[in-house]
Image: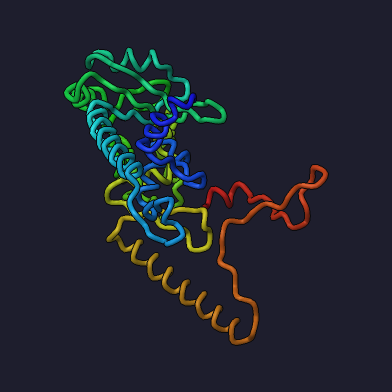
Amino acid sequence: PKPAQAAPVAAAAAAAPVAAPVDAPLRRDVASYADAAEAAASEPCTVAGNAAAGVAASDPFCAAAAARAAKEAARRARWAEVTNTRTAFVTNVSFKATEQELRDWLGPCGTIRSIRLSRDKATTHLLGYAHVQFESAEIVAKALENFDKHELHGRVMRVTTVNKCGKFEFELPEEIKEDIRNLMREKYEGANLSCLKDAWQKRHPGQKLDTAKWGFKNFSTAVKTVEGIVVETHLDKSLTNLAFFPDSAAHAHFLEAKKTKEAEREEAKRKAAEAGLPPLEEEGPKKKAPRRGGATTAATAPAAAPAAADAE
């Protein structure tokens, strides 16, 4: 500036706020609400000029950012709660199902705002469940009451509310449950579950008891949901399951044999430990030896005969 302007400029410079030192920390690490909340939860920020003295003080920027983060989190929680009340969870959806088929099925309930068929992120294949958002919570209640257990592409779809705390439990039809109980009362209590399944299919010619239709992984998982039936693991074959009535004589005999078997194993472990032998390994599923040159190795166990498999 010219000499005549030097005095006003000096006065303005004196009145201006002092700039932060060059080594003052820049808050560029706070790039989102989550970062701000994390920064507020950590140690208090240090005022740049007092860092050498170790004097800690609250940073107004951290406080404001944390307040905005808390407000945004509360807003998102309220919105999620409202959205969940208007959303129905549809499970056991066939991999062949389309969004239009779900709209045609649930459309009579009321206005559908959106349908999201969940897919695998890597393969984009359907995962077997969907979220359907309706216009109101009343429409969701109507869908649960009138549109549950609808069959599409060989799968009985189930409709329930969005619940983060519980897992949906599938169930067999009541007539199939009663058929299983009757077969067990006749002669199949304590028998292999595969024998129980074969007996049902023989008495229902042309029908296949495919429990995947009702959302189960296998027949054993389905039988475990039948009221009044207990599924036990075979004493010698860990992959074989047996069905019993809880208070029957057959089940009591099995429990006694199981107790004796466990005592024998514990005694064998004790003797092995006293003799300095390595601990006995727990019996588990037998694995097949790898094939070499198209033929099994000598360690591979021979296949069971059909008669022995039927006896199991």
Compared to 100, does 13 lie above or below?
A: below
Identify which residue is drawn at 52% across, 30% down. Answer: 121
Left or right: residue 109 compared with residue 305: left
Looking at the picture, how far across and down is residue 304, in whole percent? 63, 51
Q: Where is 106 relative to 302, above or below?
A: above
Horizontal and vertical percent position of residue 213? 40, 31
Front residue of this view, candidates 35 and 97: 35
Q: Which residue occupies 25% across, 33% down?
A: 75
Q: Is residue 311 left or right of residue 66?
A: right
Does the image show residue 24? Answer: yes
The residue closer to the viewer here, 277 or 192, is: 277
Residue 234 lies, in percent from the top left, at 47, 59
In the picture shown, does residue 305 fall above or below 86? below
Most extreme residue toward the bottom, as rendered? 274
Identified at 52% across, 26% down, the residue is 125
Residue at 33% x, 18% y is 114
How far from the left and from the top, in percent, is residue 36?
Answer: 38, 42
Q: How many marks?
A: 0
In this rendered view, identify the residue nearer to me: 113 or 174.
113
Q: Quadrant of residue 226?
A: top left
Between 205 and 171, which is closer to the camera in this rendering?
A: 171
- Residue found farthest to the right: 293
Q: Residue furthest left?
A: 138
Q: How is the image coloured?
A: rainbow
User: Can see residue 214?
Assistant: no
The correct choice, above or below, for 256 with respect to 272 in the image is above
